[in-house]
Image (spheres, grey):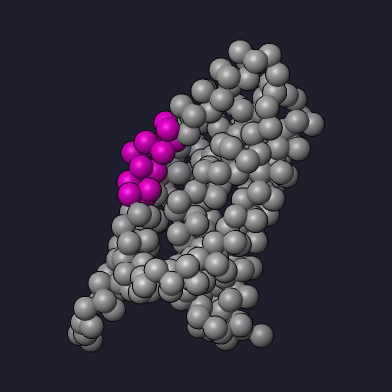
Amino acid sequence: MLNELQVEQAVAAFVTFFVVIDAVGVAPVFASLTAPGGAAYARRMAIKSSVVATIIMFFFAFAGPWLLGHLGISLDAFRAAGGALLFLIAIEMVFEKRQQRQKSRADQVLAEEEAAGRLDDISVFPIGIPMIAGPGSIATAMLYMQNAGSDPVSIGIVSAAIAANLLLTCLIFLAAGPLIRVMGQSVAGAVTRIFGVILAALAVQLMIDGIIGAFGLQVAG
């Protein structure tokens, strides 16, 4: 049974990954990429891309801290850098720059498919990487796992948060077509902007914690 602090950690981890992955914001791009192939193609790509992203994120979640240790990068430095990266992503989400870039990438892939006269496997690129397992989500997985240290409960909480979000992403992708028709582009854009504001606050807190830890500062009160 989790105590109150562990429940707060679980909620914070789940919300952070949910916001960073932004499955709702990626869903319109996924729907447009898979529309030419029909329902069976979309279902196959949704499952395969989620599996690809799961392998990548868990690899970096567990191997990332080891890599940072061998590179001589401290947790506080990585926390501050990760916070800065997430803040940039949040700014893009608020001003819809991230969605524009994703749409541009989707249009390019669609054009290539049409020119080749066939449907390519998009589960690895661009869906699995970088739309699901992008720099932000990978950095977040490494950061949370490094924060967990060697505590098995904390490791389990982070792992569960990653797994739950990737499963939720797969479900959202499976329902992407009907979901986008119900929500509409404007509602999806509004949800993404709200996520961006939340992510910005989380990112600033990470940067503050990293700076405080790196310079050994004390917080009053």
| Residue drawn 71% across the image and 44% down it | 48
Our reading of the magenta stretch's main secondary structure is helix
**105 relative to 71, above or below:** above
- The stretch of residues the image draws in magenta is 88-101
Q: Nearer the viewer, residue 5 or 123?
A: 123
Quadrant of image for the N terminus? bottom right
Residue 35: quadrant of the picture: top right
From the viewer's perspective, tell me whether residue 184 is left or right of residue 42.
Answer: left
In magenta stretch: residue 92: yes
Q: Nearer the viewer, residue 160 or 152?
A: 152
| Residue drawn 55% across the image and 67% down it | 63
In magenta stretch: residue 84: no
Give coordinates of residue 27: x percent, y percent: 58, 38
**82 relative to 121, above or below:** below
From the viewer's perspective, tell me whether residue 92 is left or right of residue 219.
Answer: right
From the viewer's perspective, tell me whether residue 219 is left or right of residue 154.
Answer: left
Res. 101 visible in picture: yes
Residue 73: quadrant of the picture: bottom left
| Residue drawn 69% across the image and 50% down it | 51
**181 relative to 70, above or below:** above
From the viewer's perspective, tell me whether residue 171 is left or right of residue 20.
Answer: right
Quadrant of image for the C terminus? bottom left
| Residue drawn 51% across the image and 23% down it | 108
Res. 173 visible in picture: no
**176 relative to 118, above or below:** below
Give coordinates of residue 104: x percent, y percent: 46, 27
- The mark tally for this picture is 0
Give coordinates of residue 132: x percent, y percent: 56, 47
Residue extending farthest to the right is: 40
Q: Nearer the viewer, residue 69 or 185?
A: 69
